[in-house]
Image: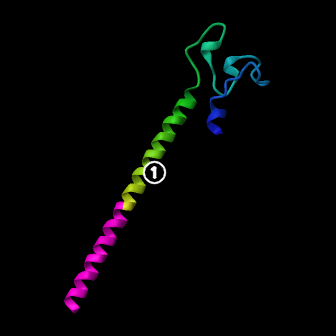
Amino acid sequence: MIDRLVVAADYKNDPYSDSDPCGTICCRGDLKTSPLLQGCYDAKVQYVLVVVVVVVVVVVVVVVVVVVVVVVVVVVVVVVAVVVVVV
């Protein structure tokens, strides 16, 4: 939902844009009567940040899972070693 809002550029129907392509949240300078090389960088940055956050979260989850597995294996090995020594 928020991604559609950030890239919204319906300047013809947006009552707050005054029919200006750069009067919207996602400015479209290429649609102006005198085209400008500008517009909608915020949406592109948002998508890059989302991808970076997702990658970081996945890496953290994988590291946590690996650490948990290593701890479980070490505990099992220690328990088995104690049982073998006691018996």
Residue sitting at x 63%, y 22%: 27
Q: Which residues are magenta?
A: 66-87
Q: Nearer the viewer, residue 41 or 65?
A: 65
Q: Residue at x 76, y 24 (%)?
A: 14
Residue 46 in percent (x, y) is at: 54, 36
User: What kind of element bears circle 1?
Assistant: helix
In the rendered image, the vertical position of residue 67 relative to residue 33, given as above or below: below
Which residue is found at the position 43% from the left and 48% from the top? Answer: 56
| Relative image position of residue 80 (x, y in whole percent) | 25, 81
Residue projecting furthest to the left: 85
Quadrant position of residue 18: top right
Image coordinates for residue 66, horizontal then vertical, percent:
34, 61
The colour style of the image is rainbow
User: Label 1 amino acid?
Assistant: Val
Q: Residue furthest right?
A: 15
Figure quadrant of residue 52: top left
Give the percent coordinates (x, y) of residue 61.
Answer: 42, 56
Pick whichever, 75 or 19, lies toward us.
75
58 falls in the magenta region = no
| Marker count (numbered) | 1
Which residue is at 21% across, 92% downward?
87
Q: Which residue is mark 1?
A: 57
Quarter of the image where the N terminus is located = top right
- Establish if 46 lies above or below 34: below
- Neighbor class of circle 1 (other Cα within 10 Å; few <14, some 14-19, many 20+) is few
In the figure, 50 relative to 66: above or below? above
Whether residue 67 appears in magenta in the rendering, the answer is yes
Question: In this view, which residue lies farthest toward the top?
Answer: 34
